[in-house]
Amino acid sequence: MHIATVSGHLEVAVYLADKLKKDQISYRDNNSITPLMNCITSNNEHAFIYLYFKGKSSLNNVDMNGNTLLHLAAEHNASNIALILKHLYDIEVKEEINNKSMDTLRQI
């Protein structure tokens, strides 16, 4: 999966994602890089979108240097992926707020 995503081979990444278990899709290499991060460094937005929704990979992953997905997008001039990340972060924050609100309501 790592080789397919870092080299930008969408078809291979899609094939492997369909064959692998969800936890295997997010497997980290020796530098704590996930295939989703490789999509960013190779500026492969289609593979990024597919893997995110297929594997529900966490947006909070960081590599061994402390780089977040957004850091990587900025570093590699992946502006479309940065826009996608902004939208996905907004959704996750809203979901987290809604979940906490529901938990609070259940306690009342």
Image (spheres, rainbow, N blue to C red):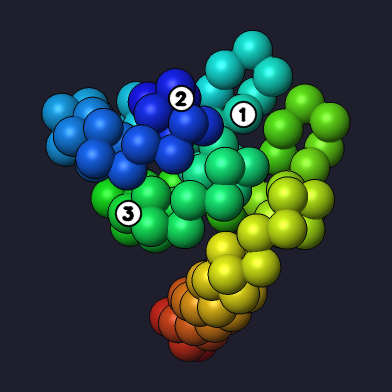
Amino acid at circle 2: His
**What residue is drawn where x is 54% and y is 23%?**
28
Q: What's the CA distance linking mark 1 and mark 3?
A: 17 Å
**Of the pair 101 and 27, the residue shown nearer to us:** 27
Q: How many other residues sit within 10 Å of disc 2, few (<14), some (14-19) or many (≥20)?
A: many
- The image shows residue 84 at horizontal and vertical percentages of 54, 71
Pick whichever of labels 1 and 3 is earlier in the sequence: 1
Question: Is residue 85 visible from the viewing direction of this image?
Answer: no
Q: Which residue is mark 1?
A: 33
What secondary structure is marked by label 1?
loop
Q: Residue furthest right?
A: 65
**What residue is drawn where x is 46% and y is 25%?**
2
- Give the image quarter of residue 86: bottom right
Q: How many other residues sit within 10 Å of disc 3, few (<14), some (14-19) or many (≥20)?
A: some
Question: Is residue 77 visible from the viewing direction of this image?
Answer: yes
Amino acid at circle 1: Ile
Pick whichever of labels 2 and 3 is earlier in the sequence: 2
Q: Is residue 92 left or right of residue 48?
A: right
Q: Residue furthest top?
A: 30
**Disc number at residue 2?**
2
